[in-house]
Image (spheres, rainbow, N blue to C red):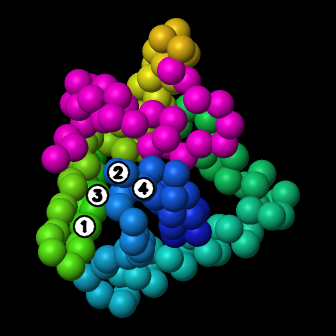
Amino acid sequence: MPVVDPHIVKRSAFFLPQQYGEAVTYEQYFVRSSFLKVVKTVFPIILAMALVRFRFFRDKMFAKFPPGTGPDAARRKESRFEVICLGKSRTSEAMTIVAGGDPGYDETAKMFSQSAFTILERHRSGKLQAGVLTPVQALGETLIDRLRNEGIRID
């Protein structure tokens, strides 16, 4: 989400300076091993973004991939994801790795449901903030603990 993520991180840093520090910058990169792999990854996405604006394309995609026709449980069990986040300052470095199983269905379901449970827990305890919040403001460390309990690795 290169368009959205920098704004979310900067907003979080602004409202939580005690956790982020005073002078925070943020950059994000999508790393591929060759230019050809970048093209193979990015071109279909750009093409689909352009074509999805036309009804004939959407109809064709819904006919080809009707709801409920995603990968089966065996295929999802073989899928994995890993995200590496690097933080650097003048005096230190930090790395966070988030990893888990199938990101398209299984782990996404865990992330959404545990986010909802975190919001419900904060509401019941009277600690739920109102307004436009970033994920770290709204969910914080509680969500991290919940995701770890569900088998998502966060180191």
| Residue 111 visible somewhere in the drawing | yes
Distance from disc 4 to disc 1, alpha carbons, whole Å, reads 19 Å
Mark 3–mark 1 distance (CA, rounded to whole Å): 10 Å
Residues under numbered marks 4 and 2 in contact, where contact means CB atoms less than 8 Å apart: yes
Disc 1 or 2, which lies upstream in sequence? Answer: 2
Of label 3 and label 4, which has the lower sequence position? Answer: 4
What are the residue bounds of the magenta stretch? 127-155
Residue 150 counted in the magenta span: yes
For residue 32, what is the image quadrant? Answer: bottom left
For label 1, count other residues whose C-alpha is less than 10 Å away and answer few (under 14), some (14-19) or many (20+): few
> Residue type at mark 1?
Leu
The residue that mark 2 highlights is: 19
Front one among 113 and 45: 113
> Would you say residue 22 sits in the magenta stretch?
no
Local secondary structure at mark 2: helix
Circle 4 sits on which residue?
17
Secondary element at tag 1: strand
Query: What distance separates the C-alpha of mark 1 from that of mark 2?
Result: 16 Å
Q: Is residue 65 left or right of residue 109?
A: right
Q: Secondary structure at mark 4?
A: helix
Question: Residue visible at 34% across and 51% down?
Answer: 19
Mark 4, other Cα within 10 Å: few <14 / some 14–19 / many ≥20 = few
Q: Are marks 4 and 1 in contact (CB under 8 Å)?
A: no
* Amino acid type at mark 3: Val
Residue 125 position (above or below residue 54): above
Cα gap from disc 3 to disc 4, whole angstroms:
24 Å
Query: Mark 3 = which residue?
Result: 83
Location of mark 1 (residue) = 86
